[in-house]
Amino acid sequence: MPSSPTLLASLSPRARAAAQAAAAIAAAFAISVGLLVAAMEMKERRLGDADSATWPPTSLADAAAQPRALLGLALEQVYEAFGETAETAIYDRLARVAAGEALETLYLQKRDALVNAAFDGGTQRVDHVDVTEAEAAVEGGLVSVAGRWRVVGAVGHEDHRHIRGAVYTARVDFALGPEGWRMVAFDLRDIDRQAVGEPLDP
């Protein structure tokens, strides 16, 4: 049986172009599936840190016992908010998970730092957020979480795309109110930018 290159060479120009286009689509689909699977695995691992018997937590002690889940689910909503294009939509989404000082800090000061530090130029897409470290303490009626997380996504340029990421370190204070847990203080302490992949074919 002829090899694949031989078969491709025997096709008409139109059929050859169609075959190459199909191969490109298949490759792009495989990359997308790979990123989706990775994101799902990260989310499952983060949710796995939550105790189903006490989630969502209804006390400071329960929340402090599950810092990775508390921080991870909050950050997921933050980055989803930053994925909005309208400023009002960004603010409204952030208000679901942040209040007071944290809402102002995230909206006015940290938007560029949290997204653009990881993705230097080009069109941007956050694929997943992975909390790698989290420790919590109950302080003055708040749950204070010292955490570190990694953001991974894609940057698109004219002729190629890169997988990029950054690692963040912050202290985040949470308070329990009538509408659930909200971040009330957000102190971003360090950003470590890093490339986490090779360029992707366009």
Image (tube, rainbow, N blue to C red):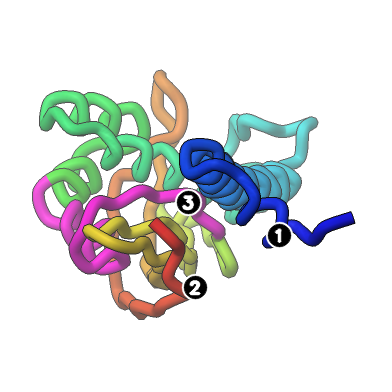
Residue type for callout 3:
Val
On the image, numbered disc 1 is attached to which residue?
6
Going by the numbered disc 2, the residue's amino acid type is Gly
Residue 23 located within the stretch drawn in magenta = no
Q: Nearer the viewer, residue 144 or 47?
A: 47
Q: Residues within 10 Å of mark 3 (few under 14, many from 20)?
A: many
Q: Does 19 appear above or below 123?
A: above
Q: CA distance from mark 3 to mark 2?
A: 35 Å
Secondary element at image label 1? helix
Which residue is under mark 2? 197
Residue displayed at 53% across by 61% down? 137
Type of the residue with mark 1 = Thr
* Residue 113 higher or lower than 180, as above or below: below
- The percent position of residue 163, horizontal first and vertical second, equals 44, 65
Dot 2 or dot 1, earlier in sequence:
1
Looking at the image, which residue is at 54% across and 45% down?
A: 16
Label number found at residue 143: 3
The answer to whether residue 57 is above or below residue 193 is above
